[in-house]
Amino acid sequence: MYRIESAARLADRVYEYWIHAPHVARHARAGQFLIVRLHEKGERIPLTISAARGDAVRVIFMTVGKTTEELATLQAGESIMDVAGPLGRPSEIDNYGTCCVIGGGVGIASTPPIAAELKRAGNHVIGIIGARSADLLILEDEMREICDELYITTDDGSRGVHGFASDVLKRLLEERTIDRVWIIGPAIMMKVTSAVTAPAGVKTYVSLNPIMVDGTGMCGSCRVSVGGETKFACVDGPEFDAHQVDFDNLMQRQRIYTAQEKTALERFAEHRGCCGEGGEQHGGEAGRDPDPRF
């Protein structure tokens, strides 16, 4: 069993958990992920490793389905049955020169370890993080501390640049040379943003965590076409050359289990209602309000 050391809400439907998992924390690298199974009858889900500290790892997730909803009911001091990892190939870190790390929405969770490793390798690191609105932004202070420059974007203009990460990236490419770019976020955001770097020929990586299910290459659900070849996001990635990824096919595959996911979530909601569950409280970390559980 793996004890939850702390649980806090970062934004609407977005939660930060520190989990005691020494074997993962000691070997985790930027870009990797872990698999959790909440209990014996639970499904396996992949979560990006957002940080490691001592014997604990941090995961940040958004409640989008049955298992993330169930995970978000757990409080500090409770335990998760299984945590496997680190899995996946680490980010390709080297001293490239000037690197830009971009996170959109909950994808921002993946950016600190990549930015930090790039910085330690001697790069000038530019960060761009964006969300629909200011109240959905996460890890701004952490990224500001790591990066040499940090740009904020919001769709509604409530904080930073009114627009998208792709707008800022386009302007930066017009002003200076950028040697490498990492983009992590929703598939459509990665598609649009990586299209900005293609004309300039800037090597760009995207993380395809969103398509993964099993995380070990056995189920085949994370098949993705990269440069015309079939790859598995969980074992060949999760990071790939953005300009080689067939995003249209990827987004179509993301919808394969929509009906089953909807049914599972509805059954979980019914079960919680029948059992009188819900409304739990998470003890927030310092500076954060406790989470009035949804």
Image (cartoon, rainbow, N blue to C red):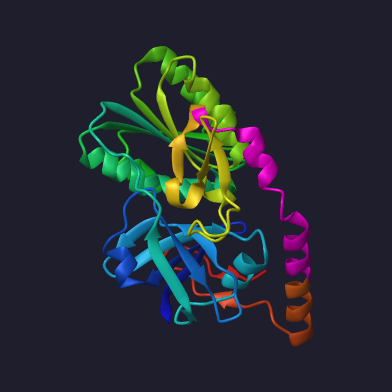
Quarter of the picture holding the C terminus: bottom right
Relative image position of residue 236 (x, y in whole percent):
44, 46
* Residue 132 % position (x, y): 62, 41
Q: Where 77 sits versus 237, above or below?
A: below
Which quarter shows the N terminus? bottom left
Quadrant for residue 83, please give it.
bottom left
**What residue lies at 49% left-to-right and 31% top-to-bottom?**
242
Whether 261 is among the magenta residues is yes
Magenta segment, prevailing SS (helix, strand or loop)? helix
Q: Is residue 286 left or right of residue 154?
A: left
**In the image, is 92 to the left or to the right of 194?**
left
Of residues 146 and 192, the one nearer the viewer is 192
User: Residue placed at 62% from the left, 57% from the top?
Assistant: 12
What residue is rendered at 55% in x and 80% in y? 39
Q: Is 177 above or below relative to 288? A: above
**Is 30 placed left or right of 73 in the picture?**
left
Residue 170 seen in the current view: yes
> From which residue to which does the magenta span run?
244-266
Most foreground residue, 112 or 139: 112
Residue in view at x 47 percent, y 21 percent: 197
Instruction: From this view, report whether residue 285 is shown above or below residue 273.
Output: above
